[in-house]
Amino acid sequence: MIIKEIEEIHWNGILEIQVESYQEIGTEELEVLKSKNEASPDTCFVCLSNNGEVLGYLLAHPWSGISPPKLFEPLPNIENCEYLYLHDMAISPQSKGKGIGRAAVIKLFEVAQIKGINRVTLVAVQGSESFWSTIGFQEVTGVNICSSYGGKAVLMEKILAA
């Protein structure tokens, strides 16, 4: 498996995986997904097979403030970054259970630390909080989450070692 920055040729594969992955909350438009990558290409990855097939992806970007960004909207201009927000990670159904997601998140942690960022947040959707807990994310309570994330969404964060 190869983890690398997203290139134009990868977007169709990313869109296919998104459709397969988000039955409950729906999918985002290509423009919205690309806005995350444009804001921070070094914290957005695609996971490829040795023959170039997209197996999964991770989109993360700088963010600040208590509430996470809204779904289905292009990313606004971000002035002051307090942490990285892991906007989306999805793995193709055929590739689940092979450590691809964990490898992508570990790569994100490495990049964050190089950039001097010590906190990553995310909103766990569709019951995924148990997966995120195994990687060290903990629930954050008392914060309003936009209803577009679904009724069972859970805000989570991981503090990285300094």
Image (spheres, rainbow, N blue to C red):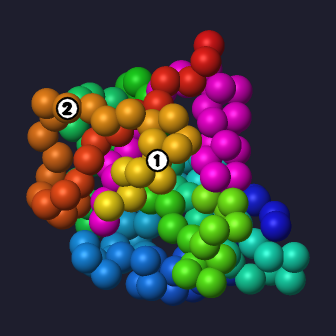
| Magenta region, residue range | 102-126
Identified at 32% across, 61% down, the residue is 127
Amino acid type at image mark 2 = Thr
Residue 141 marker: 2
Read off the residue under disc 1. 132
Q: Residue at x 74, y 83 (%)?
A: 53
- Disc number placed over residue 160 in the picture, else none: none
Q: Say left or right for 82 vs 100.
A: left
The mark nearer the N terminus, 1 or 2, is: 1
- Residue 129 lies left or right of residue 15; in this view the side is left
Circle 2 SS class: loop
Examine the structure image and report whether residue 142 is included in the region drawn in magenta. Answer: no
* x, y percent for residue 137: 45, 37
Q: Residues within 10 Å of mark 1 (few under 14, many from 20)?
A: many
Taking depth in this image into account, of 39 and 14 the one nearest to the observer is 14
> Which quarter of the figure is the N terminus placed in?
bottom right
* Residue 80, image x, y percentages: 38, 25
Residue at the far right in the pictured view: 50
